[in-house]
Amino acid sequence: MIWRYRLVLFLLLFSFIIVIARLFYWQVVKAQELSLLGQSQYGKTIKIIPQRGEIRTSDKFPIVSNKISFLLFANPKEIKNNTLTKLLSIIDIDESSVSAQLKLDKFWVPLKSGLSVDEKEKINKLKLPGIGFEKHYARYYPEASMAAHLIGFVGKDEAGQDKGYFGLEGYYDRLLRGKEGEAVQIHDAIGRPILAQADENTKAIDGSSLILNIDRSIQFMVEERLKEGLKKYGASGVMAAILEPGTGNVIAMASFPSFSSENYQDYSEDIYKNLFISSIYEPGSTFKPLVMSSAFDAGLVKPETKCPICGGPYSIGGYEIHTWNNKYYKDINMIEVIQHSDNVGMVYVAEKLGVDRMIDYIGKFGIGDLTGIDLQGETAHPLPPKNIWYPVDLATKGFGQGITLTPIELLSAFSAIANKGIRMEPHVVSQIITSDGKKIQIKPKELGRPISESSAKVMTEILVNAVNKGEAAWAAPKGYRVAGKTGTASIPIKGHYDSNQTIASFIGFAPADNPKFSMLVIIDRPTTSIYGAETAAPIFFKIAKNLLLYYGIPPSE
Amino acid sequence: MKKPISLIFLVIFMIIILSIIKTVVSGRLSTSGVSLSKIEEEINNYKTQNIILREKLLTVSSLNNIVSKATLLGFVEKKSEFILSKPLPLAIKQ
């Protein structure tokens, strides 16, 4: 009998062990999986999409805002045969690809993104089974393509998430994008939502907004003038930027040809780059004020110093240096060297400076370094090392050939002359407003003092003289003291300079005694005339006149 | 020892009352999810309307729109300006 008891006991114990093992399997090994399965039966996770921050001009007008758009999706297992035909009557979709999507063995397939509210309403009225919408925010540009190079655009990253590229969208992407949130909506047996919500909700944080130093009216006016100039002078491209010399605030910046931030896909990728901060060019005569003011600051020349080599072409290192118009003025002084934009005179000044001082001064002007402007895509070409500066290099760099820089580098350096010798960091954003309303002010940043205040003052007077008596005097506004310099740089092609293809430019500031703005206008390969005085200067002065009126500055003479 | 009959009745009465209250409150609360979702839907609808209206407002107040409307109305750019930089040549009675 005992063996029977023992058998029963063993069978009972064995059964208990099996039950305990099975319970361990469900409650410990499979616990998390079952918990998620249960959660999916009583609730669903909802992604809370944050709104991307706005970009507003100095008058607080949002030049970049958000609009609601919808993603149309379908459940292929629920849709009916005529669904596609009905959808095609309302929205423009590729019939073959959507048809293929709807045949997939899935519960969710995307059909079309970027639907407007009206389109969504029209589809809703059809009451199609298995069709749904997901709400998204898309970028909206009230001023259309205005300041496209400054703004950049919002595209998608590898994970399909929104990401800013180029300009402000690229530079401030992390601030603008915000943080996605998550919520679990619990529903009853027939799918109606009930009050309780799961604990693991995370709140969405909207992106911060940017307030720019950009003046919308000035930006609009500058773009209009540049478009006119591009057409009038038959150029390949045209660009301009305006800074406030005392603060480095960027008031306007534009470049053409341009693109639309909203439909960026329709344009070539080459056009996305903001050439004002990323194109490297030889500045030509617009570089001369930097070299001349350096020589003044070092005490090597004075305005009345005579140029002993200016009577004719100058030979150096087997090369012959000519003036731009092959006219030579014997014993002219430094004021006249700038007035006539005399290359030989600048060779004299560069030789006086020497390689060491030249590298030191133009380095202090920020040439060869990034300016630190808050836009994505800035480039800089470092200055060549001292040991490869041959005498002819020093000579040509004196008049702005054989040295490469970006337009923003030149404008930032030149603005130091307008700002009593102090160089400021160029800045586009003036204030950041976080989603909870906190305001973060971006203060002007001083980058150094390349020249003294007195050298800057002397250079200013020479530049005023260059405007009043130089080649572009005809275009200058009467009664105003404007300091400026023309530039006509030949473009190096396959190892030599093509004299018919130039980059024409004009750089200057006004009013000369208390500058309100400094500006650089560049025209790439103008065809009606190759000279800066006949192309870039008229655009510069037209914009300058508008600015002086806009700021309410009366003539001083 | 005397049994606290009144206390027992009070406890039983309290249990019954509280049970009824719980039933009523739970019954009402169970349907408030539907009301809440309706309110949330309404709020979302207003938010959407606000965004759509703001979009229209910004389009209308954009410089591009103002310039094109002004051109249609016949406004042209001023070619010359009149600047008062000196005091007017007028005698002012002191």
Image (tube, helix red, strand yellow):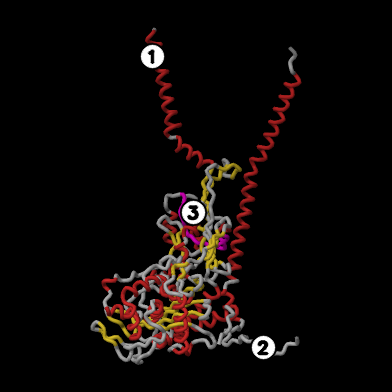
Query: In the figure, B88 relative to A443: above or below?
Result: below
| Cα distance in 3D space between marks 1 and 3 | 61 Å
Q: Is A549 a magenta residue?
A: no
Locate the C terminus of chain A and report the quarter of the image it occupies. bottom right
Horizontally, is A555 left or right of A522 in the view? right
- Do tag 2 and tag 1 residues touch (Cβ < 8 Å)? no
Q: Amino acid at mark 2?
A: Leu
- Image depth: mark 1 or mark 3 in front: 1
Mark 2 element type: loop
Query: Who is closer to the viewer here, A425 or A504?
Result: A425
Q: Amino acid at mark 3?
A: Ala
**Quarter assignment of residue B33:** top right
Locate the N terminus of chain A and report the quarter of the image it occupies. top left
Number of labels in the image equals 3
Q: Which residue is the extreme one toward the top?
A: A1
Which residue: 32% across, 91% down? A311
Q: Amino acid at mark 1?
A: Leu
Task: Report the span colored magenta.
Answer: A107-122
- Chain of the residue under the numbered disc 3 shown in the image: A
Q: Mark 2, residues whose alpha carbon is within 10 Å: few (<14), some, or many (≥20)?
A: few
Mark 3 element type: strand
Which residue: 58% across, 41% down? A188
Q: Position of residue B65 (x, y in %)?
A: 57, 74
- Chain of the residue under the numbered disc 1 shown in the image: A
Which residue: 67% across, 34% down? B23
- Image depth: mark 3 or mark 2 in front: 2
Question: Residue at label 3?
Answer: A74
Question: Residue at label 1?
Answer: A7
Q: Which mark is residue B88?
A: 2
**Quarter assignment of residue A531:** bottom left
Q: Position of residue A326 (x, y in %)?
A: 33, 91
